[in-house]
Structures are given as C-alpha cells and as structure tokens.
Image (spheres, rainbow, N blue to C red):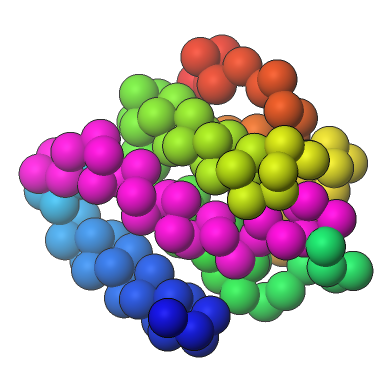
Amino acid sequence: MSISMTSTAAAVAVALLVVAGGAGLAAAGTSDLCGLAEMAFGECTAYVAGGEPAVSRRCCRALGDIRDLAATAAERRAVCACILSEMLAAGDGRVDSGRAAGLPAACNVRVGFIPTSPNFNCFRVR
C-alpha cells in the first residue's frame, strides 16, 4: 500500500469516526481507537524519529484528527499509549524529544497528550 493510500485511508477512517461523534467513540473499542490513532500518527513518525527535516502538512492534519478522536481523559491516555507504541516501533526506539514536544506548536494544534520521549508516562495525561 502506498503512503498516499495509507494517508487517505487514515483520513477517511478518522473523518467517519469524528462525524459519528460521541456515539461513534462510544461504539469504537479501545483497539479501534488505538488503530486509528496509530494510523494517523504514522504521518508524523518519520519526523519525530529524525528522518524528515520538517513537519509535513499531512502530519499536522493527522495531529488535529488525533486530538478530535480523544474526548475523555481515558481516551486521551489510551491514544497516548498507542501513539507512544507506534512512535517507538516506527523509529526503532528513536524519538527526538524536542521534535515530539514541538509538534503541537509547529502544527498550531492544541493537543496535550502526544508523547514527548520514549519513557513518557501516558497515565499522567488528563
């Protein structure tokens, strides 16, 4: 599957879940939410691992979609843990903490539950 196909699939899946609103989130299990978050954050992993020189527009759109996926503290903690797992797997354990911490500002997206280091504690997310 090509990157554009993955991007499109992630965008469509996230859009459908967001359009469905709270009912969609309530119906979606944690694994579904996790899968959507991991797929969307896949647009940012190369940058966070140091493989891309700049944040892409796709990453910023994905960050906004991820923010919209997690309406409750429990969902934010679950999404955080899933993204952390994706970050570590995709970057072979490499996470540039400065890049990860700077994603929300670089994208102008307010989101406080994106992991910023390999040992980020998602259980502290509110």
Q: Position of residue 52 (x, y in %)?
A: 83, 68
- Magenta residues: mostly which secondary structure? helix
Residue at 48% over, 61% down: 40
Question: From what the image shows, is residue 86 above or below residue 80?
Answer: below
| Rendered image quadrant of residue 13 | bottom left
Q: Which residues are magenta?
A: 26-50
Residue at 63% over, 51% down: 90
Q: Nearer the viewer, residue 66 or 51?
A: 51
Horizontal relation, residue 13 to residue 73: left or right: left
Horizontal relation, residue 23 to residue 102: left or right: left
| Membership of 93 in magenta stretch | no
Q: Quadrant of the N terminus?
A: bottom left
Q: Nearer the viewer, residue 10 or 94?
A: 94
Res. 50 visible in picture: yes
Question: From what the image shows, is residue 80 above or below residue 121?
Answer: below
Tag count:
0
| Membership of 38 in magenta stretch | yes
Residue at 85% over, 42% down: 96
Q: Position of residue 60 (x, y in %)?
A: 64, 66
Q: Nearer the viewer, residue 28 or 111?
A: 28
